[in-house]
Image: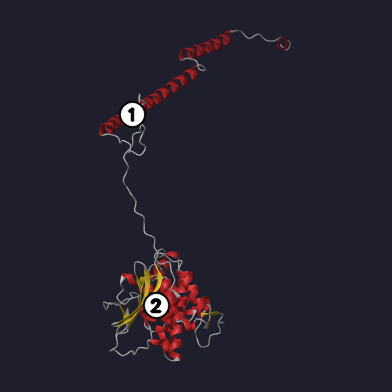
């Protein structure tokens, strides 16, 4: 990604990178210190820009990392340019720290996870995780790692800042590197840190390769290259190509799985004879013949059929049992009830008794006769 003549950030095909209007504005300044000079600005942008637009945010991070990693002149320039470079580094680290602390896990991984391109042509074998890109940037800044800075959770690079500088640039680099190692990426492939030799080499390039920025000079491209057995750092300018190993790759090769199913072996039974010969235990056991297998298949079908018959009989018996239980219930219930004929006879007897009682004359009691 580069800035074109119109001030827009475009890809290698000249297509504008950022889709949202807010990122088109944020990508306007060359220096991050003009975008997020403090946590106050960063927190506002986190809510309004970074978290709602993870795709543009990732491109924004890629652009500024690439810009700072490929810059081989600023650190070797005058103090003003040198300090401006370090301020941009602190702002970038602050942005990464803020996203890591405040973004939901899925959004955080979509912005900071996976691998980042380090070469201008975006080749796949030059893409590495964020922790390694951060280590590359740290290697360039080795002479400034002892610089007193504010903790990234509350930093302020303004001239009138009253925020205490209670940390060092090296400590804040380590904080971001450690957090980046917790993101989603191929941890088996990328399991090493930059060697001390490669970090020292990259630092020297930033101070000794003092390149004139005239248009007739080819651009510098600092990038990583992932090979079968190692990950290397390349520093190139036109036909000048220098490289050094950063770490060895010891990714385990996946063991091939043998999916062949061995033939079913038939047990060897020794049959005693008059003159029994010793059994050769080293000889391979005889496998089932085709007839044996066919016979076993037929037996299996027969047993399966018998099981089905038993299931049917069980179902039939279950139904019959339910019917008999209902019949038994009716029998028991009828033992405590009269039949319809018995019920009718009972009613007739009760009516007859009532009629008989009404027909008999009423005899007054002795006490009642005394009052007549």
**Residue 36 visible at all:** no
Q: Which residue lies under the disc numbered 1?
A: 303
The one of 109 and 318 positioned closer to us in this rendering: 109
Query: How would you rate the neighbour count of disc 1 (Cα within 10 Å): few for under 14, some for 14-19, many for 20 or more?
Result: few
Q: Nearer the viewer, residue 339 or 183?
A: 183
**Tags 1 and 2 in contact by the CB under 8 Å rule?**
no
Q: Can you give x and y, in whole percent of width and height, for residue 303 in the image?
A: 33, 28
Mark pair 1, 2: CA separation: 71 Å
| Image quarter (top left, top right, bottom left or bottom right) of the N terminus | bottom left
Residue 60: image quadrant is: bottom left
Give the residue number, with chain letter if any, for mark 2: 65
Closest to the observer, 111 or 173: 173
Vertical order, 277 against 158 (above or below): above
Q: Residue at x 39, y 60 (%)?
A: 252
Q: Is residue 173 left or right of residue 218?
A: right
Residue at image coords 36%, 67%: 229
Q: Is 85 situated above or below 95?
A: below
Q: Please, is residue 250 above or below residue 93 in the view? A: above
Q: Quadrant of residue 162?
A: bottom right
Instruction: Choose between 166 and 274: the one closer to the eye.
Output: 274
Q: Is residue 223 visible?
A: yes
Q: The C terminus appears in which quarter of the rendering?
A: top right
């Amino acid at each position: 990604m580069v800035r074109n003549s119109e001030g827009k950030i475009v890809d290698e095909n000249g297509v504008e990178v950022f889709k949202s209007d807010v990122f088109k504005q944020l990508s306007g300044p060359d220096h991050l210190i003009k975008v997020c000079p403090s946590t106050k600005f960063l927190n506002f942008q986190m809510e309004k820009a970074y978290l709602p637009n993870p795709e543009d945010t990732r491109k924004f991070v890629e652009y500024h990392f690439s810009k700072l990693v490929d810059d081989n002149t600023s650190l070797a320039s005058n103090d003003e340019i040198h300090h401006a470079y370090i301020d941009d580094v602190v702002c970038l680290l602050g942005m990464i720290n803020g996203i890591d602390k405040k973004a939901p896990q899925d959004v955080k991984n979509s912005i900071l996870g996976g691998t980042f391109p380090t070469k201008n042509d975006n080749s796949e074998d030059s893409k590495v995780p964020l922790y390694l890109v951060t280590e590359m940037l740290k290697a360039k800044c080795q002479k400034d790692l002892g610089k007193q800075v504010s903790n990234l959770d509350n930093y302020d690079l303004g001239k009138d800042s009253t925020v205490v500088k209670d940390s060092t640039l090296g400590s804040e680099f380590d904080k971001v590197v450690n957090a980046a190692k917790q993101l989603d990426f191929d941890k088996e492939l990328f399991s090493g840190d930059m060697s001390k030799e490669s970090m020292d080499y990259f630092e020297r390039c930033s101070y000794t390769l003092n390149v004139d920025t005239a248009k007739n000079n080819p651009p510098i491209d600092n990038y990583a290259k992932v090979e079968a057995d190692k990950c290397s750092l390349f520093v190139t300018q036109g036909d000048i190509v220098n490289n050094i190993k950063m770490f060895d790759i010891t990714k385990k090769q996946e063991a091939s799985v043998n999916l062949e199913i061995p033939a079913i072996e038939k047990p060897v039974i020794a049959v005693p004879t008059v003159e029994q010969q010793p059994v050769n235990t080293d000889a391979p056991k005889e496998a089932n013949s085709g007839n044996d297998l066919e016979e076993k298949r037929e037996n299996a079908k027969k047993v399966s059929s018998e099981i089905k018959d038993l299931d049917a009989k069980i179902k039939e018996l279950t139904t019959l049992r339910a019917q008999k239980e209902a019949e038994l219930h009716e029998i028991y219930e009828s033992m405590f009830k009269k039949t319809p004929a018995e019920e009718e006879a009972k009613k007739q007897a009760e009516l007859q008794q009532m009629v008989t009682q009404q027909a008999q004359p009423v005899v007054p009691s002795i006490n009642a006769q005394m009052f007549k």
